Amino acid sequence: MSRKRDGAAVRRGKDEIGRPVGEAVERAQAGEGPAQAAPDAAGGLQGGAEVPRGEEAVPAAQPEHAVHGGVGEGAAQGAEGFEAEHGRAVPRGGLRVLMLGGDIHGPVSGGIGTVVHTLLGARAMQGVDLRYHTTVAADGSRAHKARSMAAGLLRFPARLAAGADLVHIHVADGPSVWRKALYAAEAHAWGLPVCLHGHFTGLVEAAARPPLAALCRRLFGGAARVFVLSADMQRQVAALSAGRARTEILHNPCPPDGFDPRPRPPEAPPTVLFMGRVGDRKGIFDLVAAWPAVVAAVPAARLVVAGDGELDRLRGAVGAAGVAGSVEILGWIRGEARLAAYRRATVFCLPSYAEGLPMGVLEAMGAGLPVVSTAINGTPDAVVDGETGLLHAPGDRAALGAHLRALLGDPRRAAQMGAAGYARVVTAFDPERQAARLRAAWEAVVAAHPARRSPR
């Protein structure tokens, strides 16, 4: 791709989307960071080591990953790896999808990463030729993220030139909207249909400002399909697009492997698990404030916190509340450690102020845990209040503490709710079901745009 083409892409972004994004890209392209760049879903800006200048070092994870036949490939697995594992050739000539989002291969990929890996690992995706284009690094310094954002934008036309039938873009809150609007405009310029996949929580409030409101009307109204996580998000998109968006509810899938829904042994200590980014939005400090009353009622109760974020602030709050002896802070965990945290828990708690459709809640239901959470956004689509868990208003610490005491003090009721949650999640949020619906929607979009297929 030529420098002339690169400059044209940046200028077009500034003209169509607005000066802030175009200027940020120009600064990052010149190596003049730091510029503000935010990850897509679960997290804020994190410090990290600077990387050397130059495209080879940006981003740390490769910006494109091939996925064939429903199997996600990292840097080490190519077509040969797929053939060796499955004993057949990579399917060719099928549906070609170019998917865009934040880094899902780094050490901290968050909820969107889990959703993508789960959907693309489903059998229903076999025969789909999918490539994933990373739009921003998941971790590192602000300057590193800005440079990774610029690298993703500048490499994108080459991805389109390689061939695709449609472009699928994951969209979250904040800067993600501006950044993804640049990609959508480029895809439209190539004549390709664009599908958007919403993961935002409070975009309606943010879009009250005129520039973002106009952007959202164009972005969502111009998409061939907008996948939303919940009925609440569907209402948000209708408002953002002035009723023009073609929406379809596509619930997050529950990852099927490794969870143990069996009741916990009676001798296990009553344990509450919080899993998510540590900060005000997830409500962890409400949980800490409510915890002394829980321990007073259930002296053996334990609180386990898993997640990254404001850990020093959390330790200070735990110490100030006088409950350090009953709280365990694990930090960010993944893999077997993550599964083990679910297995040792009695109740899952996520008292958030804003969510899309939290993967932690779905995973907890897959692990057979009752859920104590807030009645916001997509959470009520998953948790049936009084049947699979207990919901309260965000910020209501008294109700939060009462719900935890009720379930920890009544193991039989907690087990019944956990079993009901498991039965619900394995049907309504089954990965094969959700992946089949996504593929059918993609095929319908491509069929409606027969003249818009980029060259093979």
Image (tube, grey):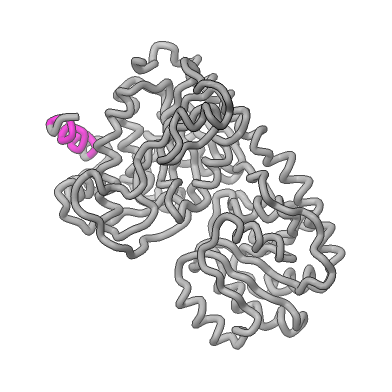
Magenta stretch contains residue 7: yes
Magenta stretch contains residue 288: no
- Residue 317 in view of the camera: yes
Instruction: Residue 455 in the image: state x and y as whole percent.
Output: 34, 15
Q: Nearer the viewer, residue 164 or 129?
A: 129
The residue positioned 76% from the left and 45% from the top of the image is: 424
User: Looking at the image, how many numbered discs can be counted on the residues?
Assistant: 0
- Which residues fall within the magenta stretch? 4-13
The residue positioned 49% from the left and 17% from the top of the image is: 94
The residue positioned 39% from the left and 22% from the top of the image is: 164
Residue farthest to the right? 412
Q: Magenta stretch: dominant SS?
A: helix
Image quadrant containing the C terminus: top left
Instruction: Residue 361 in the image: state x and y as whole percent.
Output: 64, 54
Instruction: Residue 353 in the image: state x and y as whole percent.
Output: 55, 62
Q: Nearer the viewer, residue 184 or 80?
A: 80
Answer with left or right where residue 12 lies relative to residue 358.
left
- Residue 281 in view of the camera: no
Answer with left or right where residue 11 lies relative to residue 82.
left
The residue positioned 61% from the left and 49% from the top of the image is: 378
Residue farthest to the left? 4
Residue farthest to the top? 451
Residue 285, picture quadrant: bottom right
Q: Is residue 315 above or below residue 185?
A: below
Answer with left or right where residue 353 lies relative to residue 259.
left
Instruction: Residue 114 in the image: state x and y as whole percent.
Output: 54, 47
Q: Is residue 265 above or below residue 313?
A: above
Residue 305, picture quadrant: bottom right
Image quadrant containing the N terminus: top left
